[in-house]
Image (cartoon, helix red, strand yellow):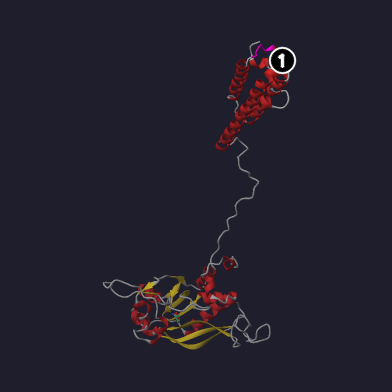
Amino acid sequence: MSDILDKTDLRFSELGASSPLEIKLLFEELLGRAKEEARSISGPSELESFRVRWIGRKNSIFSKIQDNWLVSAAPDQRRSIGSFFNSYKGFVQQIVDSCEGAIEVLEMKDPPRGKSGFDLSLPGVIRPIGTHHLIRQVLQEIEDIFFSIGFSVVEGPEIETPYYNFEALNIPEFHPVRDDMDTFYLELLKSAPGPLLLRTHTSPVQIRTMEKRQPPVRVIVPGKVYRRDNPDATHSFMFHQIEGLAVDSDITFCDFTGTIDYFVRRFFGESVKTRFRPSYFPFTEPSVEFDVSCVFCGGSGTAKSGGTCGKCKGSGWIELFGAGMVDPAVYGFVNYDPKKVSGFAFGIGIDRLAMLRYGIDDIQAFSQNDVRFLKQFP
Ligand code: DAH
């Protein structure tokens, strides 16, 4: 009998091996055979058959060696058979382990069909989808209302010259209204052609638009504006305005109030009332301040709880924004003939409108980027 595997069916005394060297050679031959067979393993099921055949508990080569060789050996040979027997098991186990590792790596690189290596039943990573900021949402709503009556959007620079921010709007140097807008000037080289500042309102874009276009003009101008205000619940160094300008040959004060009234009702609801009060802006004449009946107490001045309404301080009215008929002096700066054209303008604070509409009492919330706040306006 020459095949080593057949020899595992024999009792040890029948093998004709007695010296430790002969025992060692027997085991070496066995392990050589195990290695050879392991070479043809190409998947998990073949690996499992190999394991069962070589070191399984029952009817394996391992159990045959134990039953046929170890048990039947003379006591003086049992010791060296025992130690080879142990290393046999460890060696075959090593082959199994390394085949297992190799199979895993191969499967990840080239997954068999129907088995991706990924657990498709696990829930995926949920990435929250962002939304428009509330200011953007309110701005779009305002734009839509003005689009519906023929206005279009224009934009202008946030860094302005004093000419557009002040002079061309009929605010000469040393005019007292500049005090309110004493603001952020840029540090420039001495050789710069003139000073520049962060615009304090969107009104300069009125001038820029009229310089470029002939009447009829009907535009709105959304954008950021900057003032040197100390931050508190109603002031911020940066906020948003939407400017409006309509100029044509026959625009009347009625067109003006009708347009504003239409906008306010569309924005706050049909039931609100509007009123205007005389005011002053250098670039409009007459100038007005538009109020809306208090959206919190319905104009009664009394809070739902019974006391004085805290939002309108009991007056029943809330100040909304400034507006007016374009001052003829402004037309002089853009080469329009004041005898032939007339028009109106307004400047709405978007942040203020959003605060009124949603009952937000701190303007700082818009720029703090707190998702607990932002999430409330999906
Ligand atoms: N520019 C003014 C401000 O920021 C707001 C304003 C008032 C704009 C009246 C206008 C207007 O166009 O007619 O305070």
Q: Quadrant of ligand 1?
A: bottom left
185 in relation to 85, above or below: below
In the picture, which quadrant includes the C terminus?
bottom right
As shown in the figure, which amino acid type bears the numbered disc 1?
Arg
Q: Residue at x 34, y 82 (%)?
A: 332
Q: Residues within 10 Å of mark 1 (few under 14, many from 20)?
A: some
Residue 208 percent coordinates (x, y): 37, 74
Q: In the image, 157: left or right of 374?
A: left
20 drawn magenta: no
Asked which quadrant contains residue 374, the reply is bottom right
**Camera-side residue of 182 and 265:** 182
Q: Which residues are magenta?
A: 14-18
Residue 254, image x, y percentages: 50, 84
Q: Is residue 3 left or right of residue 67?
A: left
Residue 5 image point, x, y percent: 66, 17
Q: Is residue 326 left or right of residue 295?
A: left
Residue at figure coordinates x 51%, y 88% from the top left: 277
Label 1 CB-ligand 1 distance < 8 A: no
* SS assignment for the magenta stretch, majority: loop
Instruction: Please say whether residue 15 is one of the residues in the magenta stretch.
Output: yes
**Can I make out residue 218 in this image?**
no
Label 1 belongs to which residue? 11
Q: From this viewpoint, which residue is outermost toward the left?
A: 191
Q: How many marks?
A: 1
Choose top left, top right, bottom left or bottom right for residue 189. bottom left
In front here: 339 or 107?
A: 107
